[in-house]
Amino acid sequence: MPPTPQRAGETMVEWITSDTPVAYPDSLSFMERRAEAIAAGTASEAIWLLEHPPLYTAGTSARLSDLVDPDRFPVYEARRGGQYTYHGPGQRVAYVMLNVGQRGHDVRRFVQELEAWIIAALAQFNVDGQVRQGRVGVWVARPDLPRTADGTIREDKIAAIGIRLRKWVSFHGISINVEPDLSHFDGIVPCGIREHGVTSLVDLGLPVTLADVDVALKQTFGQVFGDSQPC
């Protein structure tokens, strides 16, 4: 079950970690309550690190044609930006409940900061994460694999981003593929992008755990957002 919202403590960000998979409807309910409390000034900002059981989520731009295998896993309307994505064991989800209004009222910059945060965390494992115009998320070049049909180096997605704002408080967030079953992505066209694949840290040959990624996320958060002290 999700944790219970706590009262605000100065300007610190509360880090919450769930050790067992969290049902998607429970996570939505918690995020909505926490976002309301943050906007009201009765709870601190929070980052929630968790896993979900295998499932697909549909963002506000999802196209039904991109749901290749609708009976494979449960499908949830996420009410966040973006298209279809997969969540499941071995994937670190970080839900970010932050006051974007107090952080500059700039949604584009906030998304760029989320991208920079992922890239900084991946760099802790010597992974060169990159962003591409017109492709949401973070990507890695795969010179070890056969080139694409037009001769360019293949790029695979390693992390996804999708947020929603309510009263200038964000919820939903990011997901990093640590060691998920990559075949589970076959039931959708991830984020509507057909010409590229997906990868994970373990798929790249790195013996990284969820706990390792949690440490990297906590260490690099302050580099991007300027405040990393937990409460």
Image (spheres, helix red, strand yellow):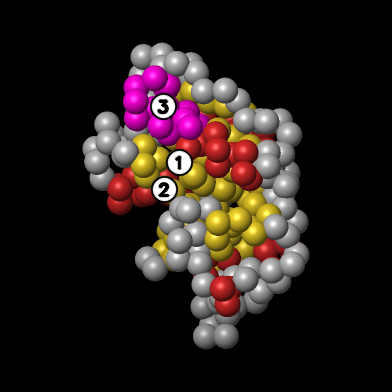
Viewer-proximal residue among 173 and 196: 173
Residue to which mark 1 is pinned? 171
The local secondary structure at tag 3 comes to helix
Residue to which mark 2 is pinned? 164
> In the rendered structure, which amino acid carries the disc numbered 2?
Arg
Quadrant of the image occupied by residue 56: bottom right
> In the rendered structure, which amino acid carries the disc numbered 1?
Phe
How many residues crowd mark 3 within 10 Å: few (<14), some (14–19), many (20+)?
some
Residue to which mark 3 is pinned? 37
> In the rendered structure, which amino acid carries the disc numbered 3?
Ala
Q: Is residue 43 above or below residue 175?
A: above
Say whether residue 185 is left or right of residue 128.
Answer: right
The local secondary structure at tag 2 comes to strand
Relative image position of residue 180 (x, y in whole percent): 72, 52
Q: Is residue 201 visible?
A: no
Viewer-proximal residue among 33 and 118: 33
Numbered range of the magenta stretch: 33-47
